[in-house]
Every structure is written in C-alpha cells, then in structure tokens.
Amino acid sequence: MIVVTGATGNIGRPLTQALAEAGEEVTAVSRHAAALPDGVRHVVADLAEPTSLKPALAGAKSLFLLLSGDLHATGANPGDIIGEAAASGVRRVVLLSTLGVVTRPFGTTRIAMRELEDTLRESGLEWTILRPGGFASNALWWAESVRSEQVVAAPFGDVGVPIIDPTDIAAVAAASLLEDRHTGGAYELTGPEVVTPRQQAEALATALGSPVRFHELTRAEAKAAMSQSMPGELADDTLDILGSPSPAELRVSPDVQQVLGRAPRSFADWAARNVAAFR
C-alpha cells in the first residue's frame, strides 16, 4: 500500500490517480473528506499531529510526504512524521522538498526543509527527494480576477523562472514510489523554459480566446495577498526568488526528462488544460 499525503491538492490528486491506474493499493490522506478515484481508501488526518497518521500508515510500504504551509511555521516538527512512518513499517518515503534548499539554503524555511531532508536520509528508510521550483498552478491565484475583470495582477511582470506543471511533479513522484532505480535520488524539477508573469497572462488569454490585461503589483501588495495563505516569512522567501532569481533558479533542469523520458509540459499546456478555472 502507498500512502499519499496532500492527496486532494494539485500534486496529490494526479499522483493518487496515477497510482490507482497503475493497480496500486492507495490510501489518500487529507484534512477533510474529498472525492477520490474508485478503490482509493481515504483517511482524514492532520500532519501537524503525526500520531493521527497511524491509521493511514498501518500496513503501508511507501509514503509520499507533502507538507502544508503551516508545517513550515516556527515550532512545527515534521520530522516526527518520518519517525511515525518508520515505526509503522514504511520502507520508502518520497519527500516533496523545494529547489530553495539548493539555491537559497540559509532562509529560515529552507533551513527547516533541509533539516527534514537530513532526517529522512538518516532514518534508515529508502528515500527520494523532489525539489521543484515554482508551480504553474500558482496561476490559480489569478482565477477570480481573470473571471471578473480579465486581469492578472502580479509583481515582477517581466522577471521569469522555469515554472513546472504539478502533474509533472506527480508523475516523477509516481515513478519514485514505484521504481527502485530512484532510491537515493534528489531531483530538481522545473518546466521547459523561463516564463514571466506577463507571458503567463498572454498564455491564459490564448487559452481563453479573449484578452487578459496584466497589472503589476508592488512587492508589498503581493506580500499582503500571499500572507493570507502562507506564513509571512515564506511569502518573503518566495518573493525574493520571483523578484531576483539566481542563475541556479533560472536553470532548466534535465531531471523531468531523465525520469519520465519526455520533456516537461509548458505553462501554455497547463493553461489550456485548466482554462475552465478562469472562465
């Protein structure tokens, strides 16, 4: 059995689907009840309380570990989840980390994630670490304004990074859970090209078949909006990357191609598949 945390999100949902289609027994973990593929077991649990995972982990061989934003906050101890997994007999953990542990290792949230990576490496379990950059699905932050005003509002309109489609992260996670050759791998996951927010607005306009205007936010305006859904420190870390990406953050990684045998999907492809959210 494979346990998927964050199973109702942009990565967990396609990962759960892919594992179920591969014939695996899957337990999906989320904080709330949710619709899931036929045959998938669902367990409601809160990763902030690692012992609440015991019913999900019983009998599991592998775990996909995705932390929600609050588990990056001061005082959180997500390493206990790995201990709980080991105590339950889990043999393999695939951890969703972040590219920032390599490119900006000294930020508070990056230090915490690096410590979690180290805890996993030292656990005695089989492990794979996935380090994605920015997500294409972050464009869903603009869905309401595009629907109501045909506007994308974002900071740093002409500064881009190679954002990745979450379904590609899910595909790499599935391979890492199912194939022994990925044990001990640490994969940097990016999209196929650098894309700016202004270019994302243009791609959404193409997908919709109607104009979408771009409005550039100040950093302060962007932080205020982001802080509604994540810790302020994490918002600052994210804005540092978006506003002034380093050469390492601009690099297009070959790892998706190497794992999946195909190129990562473009933002335009993501926009076309998710256009209904913007109508």
Image (spheres, rainbow, N blue to C red):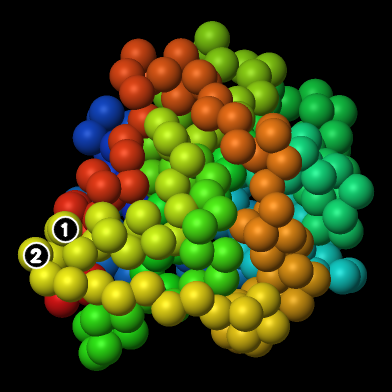
Residue farthest toward the front in the current orientation of the protein: 158
- Amino acid type of the residue tagged 2 in the rendering: Gly
SS label for mark 1? helix
Is residue 229 or residue 90 the one in the foreground? 229
Q: Quadrant of the N terminus?
A: top left
Residue 54 percent across, percent down from the top left: 63, 55
Residue 236 percent across, percent down from the top left: 75, 69
Residue 75 percent across, percent down from the top left: 89, 70
Q: According to the image, label 2 marks what residue?
A: 209
Whether residue 140 sits left or right of residue 162 in the image: it is: left
Q: Residue at x 24, y 81 (%)?
A: 150
| Res 237 → quadrant | bottom right
Is residue 107 or residue 259 the one in the foreground? 107
The total of numbered circles placed on residues is 2
Q: Residue at x 66, y 59 (%)?
A: 243
Residue 19 percent across, percent down from the top left: 33, 36
SS label for mark 2? loop
Could you classify mark 1 by the number of other residues whose Cα lies within 10 Å: few (under 14), some (14-19), or many (20 or more)?
some
- Amino acid type of the residue tagged 1 in the rendering: Thr
Q: In the rendered image of this protein, does residue 181 appear above or below residue 15?
A: above
- Mark 1–mark 2 contact, CB under 8 Å? yes
Is residue 88 visible in the rendered structure shown here?
Answer: no
| Res 246 → quadrant | top right
Q: Which mark is residue 206?
A: 1
Q: Residue at x 36, y 55 (%)?
A: 199
Is residue 156 visible in the rendered structure shown here?
Answer: yes
Q: In the rendered image of this protein, does residue 67 appear above or below residue 93?
A: below
Q: In the rendered image of this protein, does residue 63 appear above or below residue 242?
A: above
Q: Residue at x 85, y 35 (%)?
A: 118
